[in-house]
Image: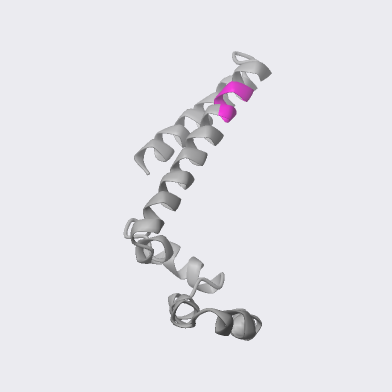
Amino acid sequence: MNNQQEELKELQNAIVYARKKELNDDELNELLRKMVNNFQEYANGRSRLARVDVSPFFAPTWCTPLENSVLWIGGCRPSSFIRLISLSGIEIESHIAEYLQVGFK
């Protein structure tokens, strides 16, 4: 998260320099490539950790209450995941549409 904050500051500075013509498009593209690669590594790391313990994936401990609210408003409801996990085998296939519809209401 700290790395993302620092990259955001770096991008903001790059925008200022680009407006002053002190930074060219190639340098901006390289910065953006670096940031996208770093974020991809972050997402891959979260995915690997979710295989070990999935609960922090859906309610990250580093999120602020506002961020958790946005996740909730966006449809990320831990109770939906618990219901899906509690089903097994064929039951998942027969009930998945129902649970997905409940999650979007």
User: Which image quadrant is residue 15 in?
Assistant: top right
| Magenta segment | 29-33
* Residue sitting nearer the eye, 78 or 25: 78
Magenta span dominant secondary structure: helix
* Residue sitting nearer the eye, 23 or 30: 30
Q: Position of residue 29 (x, y in %)?
A: 63, 24
Which residue lies at the image location 56% right of the left edge and 85% below the top edge?
91
Left or right, 29 with reference to 34: right
Left or right, 66 with reference to 34: left
Q: Is residue 59 magenta?
A: no
Q: Position of residue 39 (x, y in %)?
A: 49, 40
Query: Which quadrant of the rendered structure holds the N terminus?
Result: top left
Q: Is residue 32 magenta?
A: yes
Q: Position of residue 76 (x, y in %)?
A: 51, 71
User: Which image quadrant is residue 26 in?
Assistant: top right
Query: Which quadrant of the rendered structure holds the C terminus?
Result: bottom right
Residue 105 visible in the shown view: no
